[in-house]
C-alpha cells in the first residue's frame, strides 16, 4: 500500500521520546530543528530524542549529543508525567517524557547537526514561535509539577 492510501483502518504508530527543557536565569532554550532531521524541520523544540533506554538516562544522552553539555553541566530540576500528543499528519502518536534541567554553564552549548540555531526565551513567549506540536503544553506539564 502506498503512503497515499493510508486509511482510517490503520493504527497510529506510538513513539516514545524525551523532551528536555533547558533553563538558565529564568529563560528556556529553544532549538530550531535543521533540514537534516526526519520530522518537524524548521520547527522550534526542546532537546529531544527517541527513547532507547530509561527516560532520565536518555534525557542526559540527548542533552550531550545535541548541546555538548555533560551531566556535570546540568542539574535535573523536574521530571513530569508522560504527555501524549497525536499528529494525524504524520500518523503518529508521541508519548513524551518531559524534563527540566538547569544549565550551569550556558556558554558551553554547542549544537549538533540536528539544529540550525538556538534562542533563549521567556517561557511565556513560547507561543510566539513555530514549534513542534504541543511544545507549550508539554512545557506547562513540567512547569506545574
Image (cartoon, grey):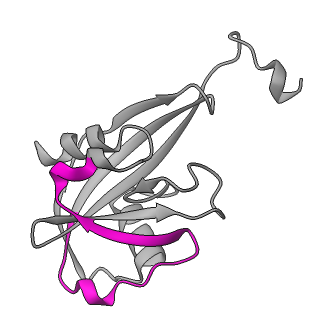
Q: Which residues are magenta?
A: 101-126
Is residue 44 part of the magenta span, yes or no?
A: no
User: Residue 76 location in percent, x, y?
Assistant: 19, 66
Q: Against 44, is 115 above or below? A: below
> Which residue is at 25% across, 40% downward?
81
Q: Against 83, is 8 above or below? A: above
Residue at the outermost front position:
128
The one nearer the camera, 145 or 27, is 27
> Which residue is at 26% across, 55% downward?
99
Q: Quadrant of residue 63?
A: bottom left
Q: Quadrant of residue 27?
A: bottom left
The one nearer the camera, 97 or 27, is 27
- Decide if residue 97 is on the left or right side of residue 77: right
- Decide if residue 101 is on the left or right side of residue 43: left
- Decide if residue 95 is on the left or right side of residue 144: right
Residue 61 visible here: no
Residue 38 visible here: yes
Viewport quadrant of the N terminus: top right
> Which residue is at 14% across, 48% downward?
143
User: Residue 145 location in percent, x, y?
Assistant: 11, 44
User: Residue 108 location in percent, x, y?
Assistant: 32, 89
Residue at the outermost right position:
1
> Which residue is at 37% across, 54% downward?
19
Amino acid at each position: 500500500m502506498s503512503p497515499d492510501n493510508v486509511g482510517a483502518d490503520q493504527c497510529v504508530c506510538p513513539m516514545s521520546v524525551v523532551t528536555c527543557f533547558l533553563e538558565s536565569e529564568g529563560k528556556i532554550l529553544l532549538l530550531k530543528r535543521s533540514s537534516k532531521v526526519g520530522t518537524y524541520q524548521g520547527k522550534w523544540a526542546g532537546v529531544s530524542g527517541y527513547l532507547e533506554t530509561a527516560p532520565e538516562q536518555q534525557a542526559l544522552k540527548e542533552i550531550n549529543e545535541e548541546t555538548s553539555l555533560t551531566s556535570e553541566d546540568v542539574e535535573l530540576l523536574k521530571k513530569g508525567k508522560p504527555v501524549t500528543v497525536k499528529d494525524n499528519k504524520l500518523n503518529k502518536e508521541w508519548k513524551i517524557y518531559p524534563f527540566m534541567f538547569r544549565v550551569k554553564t550556558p556558554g558551553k552549548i554547542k549544537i549538533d547537526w540536528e539544529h540550525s540555531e538556538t534562542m533563549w526565551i521567556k517561557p511565556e513567549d513560547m507561543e510566539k514561535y513555530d514549534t513542534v506540536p504541543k511544545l507549550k503544553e508539554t512545557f506547562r506539564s513540567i512547569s506545574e509539577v
